[in-house]
Image: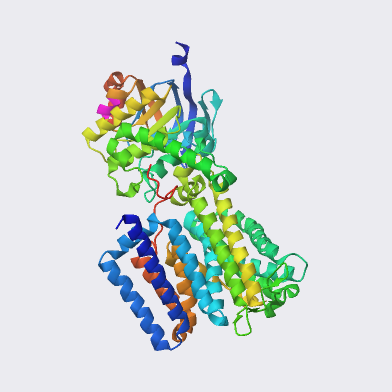
Amino acid sequence: MTQSLKDKLVILSLAVLATAFMITFLAIEEQAEIFALLVLAAVLVFASAKFGLIETISGCLSRNERLLNGAVVAATLIVAFWFYEDHFPLLMIATVLLYTVASCGLNMQFGYTGVVNFAGAAFFGIGCYTAAVLGETSVPMLMVIIVGGLVAALVGSILIIPVLRTRGHYAAVVTIAFGLLFRTFLEVNDALGGPQGLGVSGMNIFGWDFNSGITLTDDIEVSFYMNYVILALIMVMLTFVLMRRIERSWIGLNFDAVRLDETAAACYGIDIKHWKILSFTLGNFLAGTAGALYAMMLGFIAPSNFAFSDSLILVSIVLLGGMGSLWGTILAAGLVVLLPEKLQAIQEYRFLIYAVVMILILLFRPQGVLPRGLRAYIPGWRG
Amino acid sequence: MDQQKETVLAFRGLTRRFGGVVALNEFDMELDNGQIVGLIGPNGSGKTTSFNVLTGIYSANGGTIEFLGQDITNWPAQKVYEAGVARTFQRSRLCLELSIFDNVMIGNHKRLNQGILFNIFQRKALKAQIEENYSEAHKLLKIFDPALAEKIFDPVGSLRMIDRRRIEICRALISHPRLLLLDEPSAGMTHEETRELMDDILEVREMIDGLSIILVEHEMGMIERVTDKCIVLNFGQKICEGAYRDVASDKLVQEAYLGGE
């Protein structure tokens, strides 16, 4: 059997395994069963690490990027269609996908360029509120997603001024202050609904109303959340293309140089401010687009959705997945969003558990669960 | 030949203070095209400070810097690099998690297309640029060490000190600068390694037209072997200038190093 055929078989069987796992995980509700499934997954991961399987697998995956991309998209669609009439699992999948987009934005800022942003939820929220306000007007809803991102990027260009003037912890404090300000601003602003929040109209593309279910035949009615899953998946794909192209170009190299050594970067002509502004703006744009669709999906938003703790969740997704790692972002977004929803026992303690997990990660695996690899400008090219 | 006599760099009365400490005091120097100048002196005598003022990391408190006929005093670091000055650092400042290729390419910043739309949308043209730069970086690394060139996609963090120094120098040379500032290239290396490294630098100098070098060094054997002239600093002040042989026998210099009354 040739190497490439072997690789393909490995990827396909992994995809089947992951799909089956996700379907089981989303379907079962008995707490003991969920717990058992998680333990099984953990044992499998540790066992394969023990027998050196991880290296073999990651080798396979990096050699076959296209197939891997396709397999992940197919697996997501299969899982989504498996639950075609259940609202809750589809809402969860769409949430994970939108959190992935927002976390990718944060990754662009924090993981690539090293610009801290503890106001991720605020930029997500700006997207949400833009969708709420524009939903009342005649602006096409698909356009609203992009406008949501643009407004977030625009507001971010105000925050970037103090961020550029400060370093390290001070820059972090500036963004925290901005996040708190944003929430307070929403709470006292009656035009934006005040503390009670606002209703948001659903997505509508050329008369295709996302908020009504799809009736295929008399027996089969697909949940309206399926619409959002598909659109969110498309957004994840576009985000991945953008993130990859940036990472695999001179821009990504400049971002890394700024993060790793500002002095050396400046001595080689790299304009620190220029690249920080670019990555901050692009990152906020992504967070804003994710927020806009999220608000349309939920139909209702309130300031309490955009607290400091929500910003911390986004930061923890980036750290857990691995700074700058795209697949890590998806995995971490899945863990952070799904685990508390499925394991009700931990829901009350979710922030306690996040805190402990974050400390453990930073202590024992600072590079994250799926660390980012070296830059491969052209996949598979070795000179 | 006229070109030979062209002054590449001139400091006039260059001064830099840190609080009450005068790190550079009225420092004058000139560097001709193609010359190698050794900058020596005890620790804290202002050698690295003069590099930092020249490359725009520190601003000057007085005096001027002229480079290729332009007044570049207090230019930002980026502009100084664009003008053709490249440097290495005393404690090597490479990006350890990036590959050798990435690190060398950071040095080539001004010759790469940095356009945002170009990088995101014109992938074919970008690919061609990457391949072109790859072969250039490969060629340059090969002069220093063929084995290093074969490891071009390995992370720098996995390499020995001498290899890291070589990469730092390649990073400085890839953009064809007119002036190369070497800040203690021998630090952390054996005599033999230092000799090897300097031979490579001299070899590369032949390939780059009119490359001048300022070398800060404690290793006197190296200074003696490669420099055209030496400048000795003590407490931020130039105390002697001339060929190594003359400088080494100078009484003031001996006092500065060994400590007189």
Q: Quadrant of residue A141?
A: bottom right
A106 above or below B116? below
Numbered-mark total: 0
Q: Would residue A318 be seen by someone viewing this image from the given angle? A: no
Q: Would residue A79 be seen by someone viewing this image from the given angle? A: yes
Report the span colored magenta: B220-224
Q: Where does the N terminus of chain A fall, quadrant-wise?
A: bottom left
Q: Position of residue B152 (x, y in %)?
A: 35, 42
Q: Position of residue B5 (x, y in %)?
A: 45, 15
Q: Main secondary structure of the magenta part?
A: helix
Q: Residue at x 47, y 17 (%)?
A: B6
A280 above or below B116? below
Q: Position of residue A156 (x, y in %)?
A: 62, 59
Q: Residue at x 52, y 51 (%)?
A: A246
Q: Position of residue B63 (x, y in %)?
A: 52, 29
How is the structure coloured here?
Answer: rainbow
**Left-right relation of B120 to A188:** left
Residue that lies at the very extreme toward the top in this rendered image? B1
Q: Quadrant of residue B168?
A: top left
Residue A350 inside the magenta-drawn segment: no
Residue that lies at the very extreme toward the right in this rendered image? A138
Q: Quadrant of residue A21?
A: bottom left
Is residue A203 or residue A309 the one in the foreground? A203
B98 above or below A182? above
Q: Where does the C terminus of chain A fall, quadrant-wise?
A: top left
Is residue A322 or residue A179 the one in the foreground? A322
